[in-house]
Amino acid sequence: MLKLKAQIFCFFLFFTLIFTSCRDNKEQSGIETSNNSETTGILTDSETISEFFADSIAAKDLFLQRSEEVAAFYSKRKFEPVWVNPKLRESLFENIQNIDKEGLDPEDYNIKYFEESLSNLENLNQEDKSRLEISLTDNFLQLAHHLYYGKLDPIKIFEIWDLKKDDVDLVRLLDKAINQDDIDKTLNSIKPDHPVYLGLKKSLAEYAKLSTEEENIATITSGRTIKPDENDPRIPAIAKRLEELGFSIKYDSLANKNNKEIQETIKEFQLQYGIHVDGVIGPGTISSLNKGSKDRYHQILANMERWRWFPRDFGDHYILVNIPNYKLTVVKNKDTISTHKVMVGTQARKTPVFSDEIQYVVYNPTWTIPPTIKKKDVIPGAASNISYLKNRNLTVYDANGNEVDPSTINFGSGEGMNYTYRQKAGSSNPLGQVKIIYPNKYLIYLHDTPSKALFERNSRAESSGCVRVQDAIELSKYLLKNRSEYSPERIDEIIASGKTKQIEVTQKVKVHHLYWTAWRENGEARFTADIYGTDKKIYDLLNE
């Protein structure tokens, strides 16, 4: 409480000084302040605004969402009003009025207050006009902040979130809008402009309409997993729901069997909604079938918020990994060079959301066990059976890099955590024949895998956090394409030798690990499973 009172006092003192300074400057310079409120409807007396500001802050009856930026903006302009131009304030009002198209809520920006005040300017007294002037500024700044940074803090939602982007100076941004006499252009300049985000805006409009037209859907009850050719009384309801979702299906409304027709349609549904494609009707499939247009609308809102957290510029040459869609895309100068299926971290060992720059590739890599796997898998495994290490071709090293006999280590005491565990290169090495390194504190990288068949699965949250890449060798060859001494044939020779070799990547290529569960494809909205369960959390927080 004392801290709050001190802040209020300092705030009041600051504005008192500003007000006094403004008044003294006017007296010394002989500048007269004109009041053209009759033509514009807004007060243009800087002295009255500064006095109102200071009094309101002291009385705590002026709620500001971005008080520091508001103070900086008006002190810089010596409290001269900026919303004297009807075009500017009407443009801001229209942006707020239509901000739902960006997935934000107009009520967060005092839409009702502005609608009432701006339509009744001639009846406002001087205090009301000062309040309106300051509120327009405050809400522009808040709106701009939400459009650029997002409404929520991703660090409070994701366990590991480490994306950085350039800061935007909100005060300078408003200066620019006022000086250029263009609110629309200024706000548009800070919105995400990636094709995925622009596609989400189209999907949002579609599902906003669909959600208002949709009647209550009959929820399919949860229960046991329905395997192919099994009977279950929920089959007719499942078939009907598939039909409602636009899937062509012939079924007997009295039959209860998960027959071939149901299975094939379920597989189509699973493929479209990012569920493991097997024709088995399990909890995940039932949950997705039960999602109506309103649920998908909420999912789109969550994804649009998430895109506001992403960097605006990914660079000219980059690798984009969409974690829940299990997809890696190589992009150069806005052209897609290649796409690859990937496997990502499980729910327990999530792949983090972050960006970094590729530095080198390693052929025939050894695998140094990362801390999490060492603690949760290797140490308990060795404690229960010392042959665990030998069976997995793991060698133990001390802090000086000397090889240690595992039988001398008491794995049950915690002593095992003091050692390094490394698997030699070879056919059983989980990194396969190449790893692509962008050094980071999470020890995450792209790599090959000996388990190629797993890429045929539709649901691929299988790893311990790193990203396994289909055709990883081809990706590595692309990254070394500008180095003539490492032709594809030479790389094949290096791999065939079985010897570990590290090669620097001299192209500037960034890797972005991102997360989105909705996008647009072939003119239609597409969705995938929210494997880390963040969509509902984001939507709920947006509506608190």
Image (cartoon, rainbow, N blue to C red):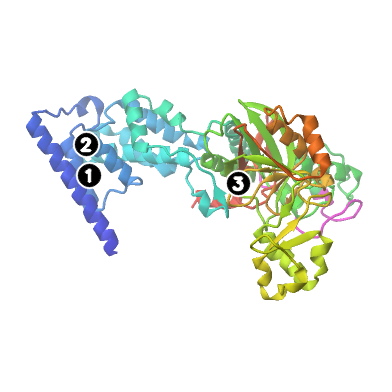
Q: Which mark is residue 79?
A: 2
| Residue 449 image position (x, y, % from top left) | 78, 46
**Which residue is disc 3 drawn over?**
439
Badge 1: residue crowd in 10 Å (few <14, some 14–19, many ≥20):
many
Is 402 located above or below residue 354 in the figure? below
Q: Are marks 3 and 1 in contact (CB under 8 Å)?
A: no
The stretch drawn in magenta includes residue 478: no
Mark 3 or 1, nearer chain start: 1
Residue at 68%, 49% in the rendered image: 466
- Amino acid type, label 2: Phe
Magenta segment: 215-237
- Amino acid type, label 1: Phe
Q: Would residue 59 be seen by someone viewing this image from the given angle?
A: no
**Which residue is disc 1 drawn over?**
53
Residue at 31%, 45% in the rendered image: 68
Residue at 29%, 64% in the rendered image: 1
**Nearest to viewer (mark 2 / mark 1):** 2
User: Is residue 105 shown left or right of residue 413?
Assistant: left
| Residue 82 image position (x, y, % from top left) | 27, 31
Mark 2 or 3, nearer chain start: 2
| Residue 49 image position (x, y, % from top left) | 20, 39
Mark 2 or 1, nearer chain start: 1
User: Is residue 512 shown left or right of residue 52?
Assistant: right
Give the Cα separation between the discs numbered 2 and 1: 9 Å
Is 93 located above or below residue 295 in the figure? above
Magenta region, main secondary structure: loop
User: Is residue 535 shown left or right of residue 346?
Assistant: left
Please state which of residues 142 and 289 is positioned toward the viewer in this rendering: 142
Residue at 17%, 29% in the rendered image: 35
| Residue 159 image position (x, y, % from top left) | 58, 55
